[in-house]
Image (tube, grey):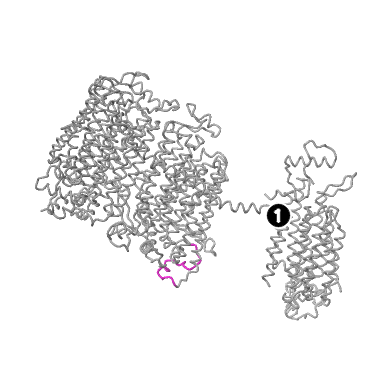
Amino acid sequence: MGELIHPFIVYGFCVLGGAALCLALPRGGRSPQVLGALAGALIAGLALLALAVKFAPVLPNVYFYIFSLIGVGAALRVITHPRPVYAALYFILTVISTGGLFVLLSAEFMAFALIIVYAGAILITYLFVIMLATQAPQEDQTEVLASYDTRAREPVAASVVGFLLLAVLTTLFFRGVDRLPMPPSRVDDQALLADMPRKVENSLRSAGLLREGEAIREIDTGAGVVRVAAGGAVRDIPRSDWPEGMGVSNVEALGFNLLREHPGSIEIAGVILLMAMLGAVVLSRKQVEMDEEAKRRQAQKLGQTTGGISDVTGPIGGES
Amino acid sequence: MTLAQTGAPAPMAPSTLGHYLLVSALLLVIGLIGFVTRRNLIIMFLCTELMFQAAGLAAVAFGRYHLNLTGQTLVIFILTVAAAEAAMALALVVLLFRRKESLNAEEWQDLKG
Amino acid sequence: MLNLIQDTIVHTQPESLGAAVEKAGHAHGQTDWSVAAIVALPLLACVLTGLCAALRVKSKLPAWITVASLAGAFALTLKTFAAHFMGAESHPFVVHVFDWVTFSWAADAHAQGPQTNELAANFAFYLDSLSALWMLFVTGLATLIALYASEYMSHDQGAGYCRFFAAFSLFVFSMACLVMADNLLLLYLGWEGVGLCSYLLIGYFYKKPSAVAAAKKAFIINRIGDLFLAMGVMLIFVQFGTVEYSVLFEKARPYIELARAGQFSQIPFLVKLIPCLLMGGAFGKSAQLPLYVWLPDAMEGPTPVSALIHAATMVTAGVFLIARTYPLFLLSEIALPVVAWVGALTALLSATIGMAQFDIKRIMAYSTVSQLGYMFCGLAVLSPSGGVFHVVTHAFFKALLFLCCGAVMHGFAGQLDLRKLSGVMKVPGWRIVGFGMLIGCLNLAGFPLTAGYFSKDMILAEAFVTPGTAVIGWILLITAGLTAYYTFRVFFRVFVGPVAYELGDEHHGADHGHDDGHGHGDAHGHAQAKGHADAHGHGGTHHEPHAPGWAINTVLATLAVLSLAATGLYFVGGDHGAVAGLVDQSSAGFHSPLAHHGAAEGAPAHEAGHAVVSYVPEFVHARAHGGEVHAGTIFGADPHKAMYFISAGVGAVGIFVAFWLHLAGRKSAATSRADALLPALGPIPGWAQGKWYVDEFYDFLVRKPLWVLSHIFYLIDSYLVDGLVDFIGAAPRAAGKVIRPSQSGELHGYALGMAGGLVILIVIVALVAT
Amino acid sequence: MLLMAAILIPLVSAVLIAAAPEARAKTIALLGTLAQLVIACYAATVFDWSFSSRAQLGMSVAWFEGLGVSLSLGADGVSLVLILLTGLLGPICVLASSTAITTRIRTYYAWLLVLQAAMAGVFAARDVILFYICFEFTLIPMFILISLWGSTNRRKAAIKFFLFTFTGSVVALAGLVYVTWFNATLDRGAVPQVILSQNELLGTWTFDVSTLITAGQMMSASEQAWVLLALMAGFAVKVPLFPVHTWLPLAHTEAPTAGSVILAGVLLKLGTYAIYRFALPMVPEAVALYAPHLSMLCVVGIIYGGLICWVQTDVKKLVAYSSVAHLGFCMLGMFALNNTGITGSILYMVNHGLSTGALFLLIGMIYERYHTRDMNQLGGLAAKMPVWATFMVFFTMASVGLPGLNGFVSEFLCLLGAFQASSSWGSGAWGSDIEPVAAATPGALGPWFAMIAGTGMIIAAMYLLYMVGKVVWGPLKTPHGHAGGHAGHESSGADDHPAPLPTDLSGREIVTLMPLAVLCLVLGVYPKPLMNAIQGSVDQTVAVVREPLRTHAVTGAPAKPAPASPANTHGEGAQ
């Protein structure tokens, strides 16, 4: 059996999803957005259901379905909501559900890091910028959405290309996952303990397995023993005796992996961040030199919003 | 069925990986479509962030499947780049907005040179 | 007996030219600086006059420098001549100064046959009697003419004066290189060097467009000849592996032997080709058909220049070349006949043109062309000594004639039209000029017992003697009559008869376009103005011609005396005159058959010489069968004896006709009895006056097509060749224009494109994977 | 080390100029170029002329070791002579620019010096990649010089110059790399031991010039032909040979004076030098086979370029087209493939650089004064500028090839070389018997080539005297607004020049021209040192091409690839 699902089913879903998304995209208020959104959600649900039905014995955790539905739904909202603020908030929802999926994938540290960095830092920056860059509604009028927010650009073409991509991607990996090398049945997750004598010592000591005056001489994870010595006497503590919390946590493993195998990349990442900071500072400090045209337009715009200055400089530029 | 897992992670079925990849692909495509259809610079950036999410999810899923940490390491770097990108991009957006009082990406076509 | 004599004759060349030279060169060991100084002195004068120009000297200093240097060169030449070439036996010798284009290379190890791996062309001087003789009259005349020019050019003191004398000295230097060169490459240097000086001096009055055009024409036409000369030099190098005369003559010796035996068929074609190429160069430089057209135009230059360069020395370089490489010319059965025919036709053609001209200087120019034709004929009819003798006598009397014309031009404000001058000799102060002119004319007309008479006779007689050249003899004889006519036409119209003249409208050669107001701070302009004041003292409206000063008169008198004295050369030193003696000992020296027809050693000598050049097949045939050869006769008499009387008679007829048509009964300057004759001749005088429209013909045949071709080339280059390049450049641009809209600057479009590309990529990967 | 210094000093000076204040730029540039000249001269004294065919003064530093690229320098007689020429023209160009360049002075001089360095690098390189880098790097400064300081049509000229020559040389690079690849895949076992012992690098991935030359000779005839085609695509454009010359008139016309001088003086020589250095010894088989075809292009270029000169009205364009004709002579001599021809060709490189460079200087001086190069607007300048006119006539005559000046020696030798190079000599083909001919060399050119090319001498006289007749002689004519008069130049010159130029040449301008004039004269009268300097190298090259030449010329068909005998290839032509 080559595929997880028959390709034509996948394509069918893709076509339907594309059509649904087309409907869902904002079109200046005239489009049946809600209908599209509902259809899209329905199709996503159906797709997942199809998968679930097909692989009943090895289904993923139920939380997977919850998080992925929330995530995909929120993502759809991100791109369909005309108000940037809402879009950003929906994005936070996506981030959170992705975090959930990370947890399911036993990447706890990444899950929280994601939420903290994205939802806590980046998205807040976005919100600041959105607020900076959006005209607050005047008191006497209802909020006017910018036309570029309310109308999607070439929704059909984008959906076609997008779902075409989805179709080929899914075809590929539904066909391909089968040929993946089977994962190692078991990894020695304790191997790193050899590099953490202090942790081992602390946990052994707090579990009372390490007597006074004894010190760890060797941690042999291969043989599954901790060799302790006091003076001349040496004894082994076998794995079966180890306390519950002595295992290697995800954070620890990640930390070792990062620093051992990618030290250079970390440096580079640091430089990138530093440069980004400097760049942002430099850019935001820059005084905008507006040319005459831009000044005129801005004056007109201000005149428009305040309803003040009548235009003396000519017809209003094409701000359609 | 609990959310939290303890001890060494168990091997994952290939079909489960397929599920995750499907979600990842969905996020990617949605982000892409958003990027193409929306004109608001900020939302376009949000869409790129969506695609980052998709990539991160796929990376972590693969890492989980192979029971190694490379995927997660990759996500750390993705995070880094995303943060840097966000800082720079948003600074630029502010700058651009100051010039034209608009977030419409189409107004900056002349930046092509 | 024949063989024995043949050996003696021909051996005079290679031995004296080959082995002896080597000996002399080695014997000298070190450079003979007095010989080098002959060349160096004019160069020094050139440099010094150039310095004068840089220092803005406005006096006559440059002239004196030049005269002194040239006189020094003359004295050294005389000394060398006296030391080496006065005796009956003389040996050529080589003076090596320094290496010029001399280099050698690694020999070709696998080559077949003898290979030259060296090109040796040094600054070295080859002195034999021929070059010494040539240098004698070149430096001597140059000194005299420089003296003449010091007065003639005095109106132009300042930068122009310096320029004149610098070019003048440079000319003598180049001429010296040409004549004394030890190899053909150095000869080529002199050859083109005199061309350059000629260019500079013809274009001396550079504000006159006609002078500039004439200078250009002279240079370019000379270059055509030069190309042939260069090709000849190359062919000599390829064939013989050397360009040095001494080696060359030695190497050519086997071929000379063949030629002597009449076995021309065994001489390689390439060797026969050499003289044909060389003569092309000679025709260019010596203004022969078809390349003679530059010389009449060259009269745009100042008259001293015309006298020295375009009458006496430079234009005889072609004659010198042939005389110098005479052994090579003997190797081809067609080379000398071609030279003879070209010379004869040129002589006749230019004589006819000269008859119809009114500009006295131009008449002299055409007469020069005509006389050069004589010289070529002299060489070609196996009378190199006659040819060379004519060169020498012609140098003196033609220089004299030109200088007299120059004096007239100088005194009569540029008037050269013989219809506007008459009785000049009777004007006070013009007696010397008049007598000088008379002597010159007598020489040119071949009046009995003048130098010109003897030299011309030598050529004419030999033309009738040499088999197969009788027609040439007749042509030359006719030309002699025409020459006498047009020469005395000038004399009778201009110098005698009623006194009537009209001054020219030019101030000394019209070099100042009256626009000198522009020349702010220009020394030239000031000097010119001052020159006017000094020389004339009567400002712009001058009605009186001013007679020549002492320098001009001295020079004219000296030249007149020398022209007469040249006659003496025919009677002293050897059997056929001093010149013949000298020529015999040089490269041109095989015994001239002249006047020794019946002598025991003379007759076979004559025949041997003829065998060398016999181009009439029957003659060769007859000779090969041992038949008696009949030399040409003229009215049944021995040409050598008859010619004295015939040519005197022809000359007298010419002079008489000129007298009757142009002097007898003439009342005014403008008209003469000859005018009545014109209608009878129909359009012919007009054509002759129009120089037979040769210039126009060349313009139509060569220049115009070339001009059109050049424009076509330029169009092709601009539109076709470059257009192709532009098209290749434009193709990507057009392609870019087609896909440019995709680069709209819209991020969305780019993103969509990327996504689409990704899809395609993935599909490709998927297809490949399955 | 000396060669390295000759390259580095201009580079360092360029950096200094970029860093120094505007007012100092000129001085530093002058000092930098002078230093380069002094070093070149010193190198010439250190050089062992008795082994002038060997690359001397060498140094080699590994550069990209994995790629076989090294920073390898060395000069034989020919290279050194051309380096001297480069060094000589440097200070002259700086001096010539001092009043002509008034904007962006630092940029100008900095690029000029970079150009100097790159050109010296081309001549000194003994590594193909280094050579190519320098070869191409000359394009950038020249592109900038033309496009920033050129005249009206400069953009087009600069782009055409760049793209045209660049496209060509990329192909040439492909050819060189092919030879490198060929060398790398060479089976060392099949190479005679004698050759191997002299070239340890044979069969390895290297860009060493002499190794590649040896390797190239082992290629098959068809491979050689293709490599020759590739090389010529690059180098013939640079020379430029006839059909690919059209960038030259445009670039010359638009370039600033110093740019034209360098372009004519040295840049064109890069092409001829490269052909001499690479094409001839590397693919002798193909060169021998195709020399007649290439020579035909040269001859066409001589006539065609000359005639086009004749109808020009732009005096600079005239001189530019004359370069096409002159380089035709140069290449004709080269493809004669004998000693006289190649010697003449190399002399021609130097001589053309001197005389045509000087002509461009002179035209630049006129342009500075009258702001026109139209011969219909200029005339009779001899009356106003006698010193200038003297130089003009002098250099014109040098260019015409008047004996006694430099042009003649080289032109004559080139023609003589072509004349000699015919295997028909003494074979009965010319109607003669089969007799040994003293100075004939194997080849397929012969008298007709020389004769037809020789008409180029006449045409050269025609167009150059036409130019002199128009500009120097004749009634005085200056463009409107530059009528001159007693007021001189104060009125017209003031807006462009801080100090108005004198009517005639200034002292600086005379100093600029004088060295060239002296050299023209000296090389015309005493070319022997120069000829001796290059003879060793030329002998070596001739020895390489002679064998295939003889084979081709006799059979008229491509010969089998015969590995060149070691004696020929590497005989150090000890003279």
- Pick whichever, B26 or B70, lies toward us: B26
Residue C72: x percent and y percent?
25, 35
**Magenta region: which residues?**
D190-207
Is the residue C523 above or below the residue A4 in the image?
A: above
Image quarter of residue C451: top left
Asked if residue C433 can be seen in this view, the reply is: no
How many numbered marks have been drawn onto this rendered protein structure? 1
Label 1 element class: helix
Is the residue C167 above or below the residue B66 in the image?
A: above
Magenta-drawn stretch contains D482: no
Q: Is residue C431 left or right of residue A138?
A: left
Q: Is residue A99 left or right of residue C41?
A: right
Q: Dot 1: within a 10 Å radius of its alpha carbon, few (fewer than 14), some, or many (20 or more) residues?
A: some
Disc 1 target residue: A275
- Pick whichever, D456 or C297, lies toward us: C297
Residue type at the position of mark 1: Met
Image quarter of residue C314: top left
Is the residue D217 above or below the residue D94 in the image?
A: below
Q: Which residue reaches farthest right? A: A140
The chain that hosts pointer 1 is A
Q: Is residue D323 left or right of residue A242?
A: left
- Pick whichever, C377 or C682, lies toward us: C682
Residue C49: x percent and y percent?
34, 33
Magenta-drawn stretch contains D198: yes
Residue D476: x percent and y percent?
44, 31
Main SS of the magenta segment? loop
Q: Quadrant of the C terminus of chain C?
A: bottom right
Asked if residue C604 can be seen in this view, the reply is: yes
Residue C134: x percent and y percent?
23, 40
